[in-house]
Amino acid sequence: MKSLLDACCERCTHTPEKPCQDYLFCRTEGPICHDDSSCQEKRKQFIEQKRAKTSGSKRILICAGTGCASLGAVSIVQALSDELEKHGLTDRVEVVPTGCHGFCEQGPTFIIEPEGTLYVKVSLEDIPEIINEEILNGKRIERLLTVNSTTLQTTTQFNTNSFFEKQERVVLKNCGFIDPKSIEDYIINDGYKGFVKAVQNLSSDEVIEEVKKSGLRGRGGAGFSTGLKWSFCRQAPGDKKYIICNADEGDPGAFMDRGVLEGDPHSVIEGMLIGAYAIGADEGYVYCRAEYPLAIQHLEVAIAQAEKIGLLGDNILNTGFNFRLEIRQGAGAFVCGEETALMASIEGKRGMPRVRPPFPAQSGLWGKPTNINNVETWSNLPHILRNGADWYGSFGTEKSKGTKIFALTGQVNNTGLVEVPMGTTLREIIFDIGGGIINNRKFKAVQIGGPSGGCLPEELLDLQVDYETLTKAGAMVGSGGLVIMDESTCMVDIARFFLNFSQSESCGKCTPCREGNKRMWEILDRIVKGQGEMEDLERLESLAMVVKDTSLCGLGQNSPNPILSSLKYFRGEFEAHIKDKKCPAHVCTALLTYFIEVDKCKKCGLCAKNCPVNCISGDKNNPYVIDSSKCINCGTCQDKCKFGAVIKQ
Amino acid sequence: MTNSINEIPNAQVMFVIGSNPTEAHPVIGAKMKQALAKGAKLIVVDPRRIELADKADVWMRIRPGTDVALINGIMNIILENGWEDKEFIAERTEQFEQFKEALKKYQPEVVSKITGVPLEQMLEAAKLYANAEKSQIFYTLGITEHTSGTDNVMSLANLAMLTGNLGKESSGVNPLRGQNNVQGACDMGALPNVYPGYQSVTNPDVRAKFEKVWGVELNPNQGFMIPDMFEAAHKKSLRAMYIVGEDPVLTDADANHVRKGLEELDFLVVQDIFMSETAKLADVVLPGASFAEKTGTFTNTERRVQMVRQAIKPIGNAKADSEIICEISKRLGVELNFNNTADIMDEVASLTPQYTGISHERLGIKGLQWPVPNQEHPGTKFLHEGKFTRGKGLFTVIDYQLPDELPDEEYPFLLSTGRKLSHYNIMTRNSAGLDSYSPEELAEMNPIDAKKLGIEDGEKVRVASRRGELETKVRVTDKVLPGMLFMTLHYKESPANVLTNAAYDRVSKTYEYKVCGVRVDRI
Amino acid sequence: MSTVTLNIDDRKVTIPAGTTVLEACRMNNIPIPTLCHDPELTNSGSCRLCVVEVEGMRSLSPSCVTVATQGMQVKTNTRRVKEARKTVLELLVANHPLDCMTCQKMGDCSLAQYAYEYGVKDDVYPGERRNVCLDDSNPFIVRDSNKCILCGKCVRVCEEVQGRSVLDFYQRGFESLVGPAFGSDLSQSDCVLCGSCVSVCPVGALTEKQMIGKGRPWEIKKVQTTCPFCGTGCSFDLNVKAGEVIGVTSNPEAPVNGRALCVKGRFGTDFIHSPNRLTAPLVKKDGEFVEVEWDEALDLVASKLRAIKSEYGADSIAALSSAHCTNEENYLMQKFMRAVIGTNNIDHCART
């Protein structure tokens, strides 16, 4: 028995062609078909070794997700493996490149089991020390540890670190803790047990009931009840049905789906198996953007593994249930995250949304009833089936159950992926988990929900994050991107940024979205250039309302949200741009003036030397002066000045 | 057509043989594509890779002129598998047993050898056609322009009867008639054997009816069909011809023979809107009016009689054909008393059973599909519902016969002729737009042949048959099989009919435009 | 047939079940502006001009794709609806050339009509306007993408009616355009120039080249007639100005073809005014044709026929009638041969 998946002895008859219904439980708790303590012992040992529970053995979990990989994690994995081999430690120390730990700001991150030691910002140079101190001597390396931002104590274990401590990791439970390319790892960690429970103990309707009872709502943005959505598709007449996983994560600043696919691809497959069984589908697609090569690679591996042992294919676990799964790669159109556009794209057509009804549940992919959920939604399912709807319902608020993953980005200390129960306040996420604003600057706003969401101000930091509350405030949960902004951010400029995204990603089909977003962008562009007029605000607002009210799909219906919320909470900033021709955050180039404070100027001349338009004059005797009529506001002088003498206003 | 054009989008199975609708009948071709988009199945029989061939579920690339063998073979398969419509055969047809017996010799293997169509394709076609709830046959000149044209049509009728595909929507045997009013010209008795409404000139009762209305005694003998006319002219038994709106020198097979026949005449009068090749031979040329300059009706391929409305006055000194005919008649001492063309239609209605309920007033915007047996009748969407014209449908044993002239050593290419999208016969050459869009003949030749002969795409060649020769440019394309050449009949500069064979079908006397032997030489 | 009753602008309206709100309005003479809707095509619901207020719906509903239901409360002329429509029109106008004076579509342009009705001004959204090249590459259709409002009717008619799918949308957002693959010209595409796209274009983006400068809608008389080319029997409108046929336009009432036509029917009737038309009777004298008066020609024909008949008998004369001529002319021709000449020698190319 080389792998947990192998037969313990010749008495095992399982093959994907002639599947054994007890296969899965047999592998972790078996053997089941016969009583043999030696067979049982073999399996037990295998599992314990994998859990680093045999004495002296260690597992080093190295985040090799896209974030840490870009910080050199891949070569670190290699170097560490080489080093271990050199020391003859490969028997008792296993190096596991995992998916994202979530602590992206501090990457590359190590978690060393069984102790759970968390090392951050590990570099190649640290490896010998890790071997000598941590592995051979069992000593912690102080400088690679983190400090709990509440207690200000150095923490050794990841789960006492303030970033992890306050999270509730359900969907991300495995992410960073198992080898995403190993189906064994997934199975040892209760993988596929939710599916087995569904397909062997429950009817399709019972599964749907369970999902409804859990209160799970779509994590892609709209927050529609997943169980209800499934029931529509199940009830739709049709001999052929499809399910689709929407992995076309396109919001700027959102990467939770990538994290799940890279770190725990089998959870998505298991979720889809559960859904397919409940709905009556025998074919599924994962529509993933081509910009996620690692996620696609991990998913491909996972699908092949599941096929190999008969968890995908015909007559799965001898239940008569068939399901096949394929990946389709998107070519980078944001609108393909919209479900009807996504289906058109799978069909090989231009990714353009169409009017609903008919809804995909009635007429979806190739005209057949189809159910679409996103990555995070699907990967909630195994947990719900494994642990029950009541357990799941214990997380979250009354109407928004469970947990939600957020991607924290922007001017926050701990950028990364965090998972918290629904109902957690923005303050907790940003300050307790996120560690507050970089350089202790002042928090200004949080953009939540991507280009479809809105900007919320400091006053709303104590809002509980759930579907209804955020929508009421003019933002939305969306896919869960949280972009944190501090006082150096101009809200007009940010609104313009999101509008630019929406207008260039509009598919061009409906008039308000195609033309309206462009015109709103143009108005904002005029304002940041100091050419705005007060009537522009009125026009902007009324146009935004019409675009919202008349657009065909979610892209256009929500693209005005960043403007409307900014106008609601930061109107003064717009007015400053228009009336005073000033950008309070000193961001909008056209509205800035640079000058040199005479007192601070050391007359070094660096500013003048680097000025691209030669508008700074002065010499050793005379302080340098900027000729603002020639200045193009590029900011080079400010960057170059070592004495902080160049000021912008 | 037994059925209507607007039943096509609802077709389940379409069997298209010897027809290139997307070019020759583009709007019908488009409707076929609408049916395909809705999931209809398509069987195409054509030696050329026409547009529909690429969209077909089964494309049988038949050897030209072997249609009867193929259809018999398909029917053999249908009977072998018990896919025939037994109820329909029993209730609505006769002589089935005899027919069934005769089909036995068309074993699929034998047929495959004759036609060059693989067995599996025949089986698949038979299965699709016979097992659908309704299947629809379409054919055009690829079926009729053969010495076996009538046989081909009868075979298709056998196939439809065998499977009960007649007398219901989206079924039937549907010839896509060539010219705009070829259906109407036939309906109107511009034929040597029948009066309007296909009433035989040799039937004394019929003749009496017409004599009564027309007030003259009528000739009881059938007249000449077109090929007979040119023969008779050669023999001097025909002395004069009055040709209206036709250009046989360009459009009839073996054009040189036609031209010589016309030259033999004592007197030739041609009435046309352009100086046609035929008009050039005339003693008198009379300028007629175009369709935009007169009022009347056309009858389309689905038997729909529709109004043609005068939009402008005749150009220059031209006159409507009806006016000219009346003028000549008057000078021959007979006043044909009609105030207008509506009056003519009223007389047609009084003598033509199919047109009884038709008048200009009733036609309006939508027209009427004959038969229209009375003034209140809404017209007939499809024929043969419940009963055939003759009562029971007759199964006719048809045997396969070879085309009259096949390629040989001297004339190694098989020439087939047809139409292309951008032109219609010869009239469209007078459209400056269409002519600039598609100004010259491009004879289609397979790349293998082109390579063998050293001919480049677009090169000019000389094509010759036993009857004549011409020059044309070549389009090298795999639309045609090796050994085949395809030309259109649109270009007087490369008049394909100097090559074609004037052998004709024994019943319809239609020339075999689709098969003859030619030679291709580089210039 | 089951029906539903709904309330439109406080009016009770009963219509067959399955009817859209747009159809329900139009059946009851309640005006709803549309640009992308076409009864012969599937609805794309993309122009958003036909929006109405439906009670209980968060957003405005496009009436063309909203199926009327029992008890539905619909408002078609509230301030919110009118503002939305006006804004949609303002947005379209902001990205549309304002050369209406010289535009071929003047007087027949849906955008101009609605813009006028809704009081749209041209200066609401100063900013970028589309500026792409004209496709003038073929003899029949001019494609001016700057005038295109992306209603997509041409895309749908090409796919759904003609089964060709030559046209589609390309590029995204404000840059979106309609055209053949890779932005090529029609002449480089698989287009067969049937002109169905022209027949559905609501603005001047697709026009008949041959008709440019030939006449304004109010100067043109449309005469419905039947096509003189193949046996399909399409009907269409001849467009006549000052005694001249200047072109052909589709007639949606055409029983066989609807608005579909082929390149010949739509663009080939210019043969009517071909300089090659015969305009006077000709008699061959000494081997040359000479123009003569009608009487001379007709007398000659009559005398020749009379003489030949008396010398060789009626059966020595034959006639070819024509599949291009009308039924009435064919009837007359065979009657002439049978009743006047006295022979059955009449035939035509019945089989070609």
Image: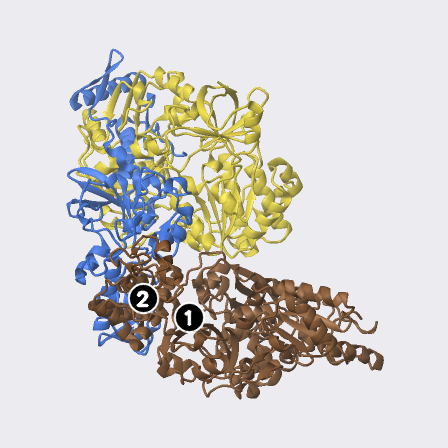
Decide: few, some or many residues near mark 2? Use Cα within 10 Å; few <14, some 14-19, many ≥20.
Answer: some
User: In the rendered image, which residue does mark 1 sit on?
Assistant: A450
Rendered hue of chain A is brown
B189 vs C115: above or below? above
Numbered disc 2: secondary structure: strand
C186 vs B128: above or below? above
Left or right of B514: which side holds A618? left
Rendered hue of chain B is yellow
Numbered disc 1: secondary structure: helix
Disc number placed over residue A648 in the picture, else none: 2
Left or right of C82: which side holds A507? right
| Closer to the camera in the image, B139 or A429 | A429
In percent of the image, x 44 and y 31: which residue is there?
Answer: B510
Give the mark nearest the N terminus, 2 or 1.
1
Q: Position of residue A437 (x, y in %)?
A: 44, 77
Left or right of A474: which side holds C33? left
**Subunit of mark 1?**
A
In percent of the image, x 41 and y 63: which residue is there?
Answer: A353
Left or right of B468: which side holds A292? right
Rendered hue of chain C is blue
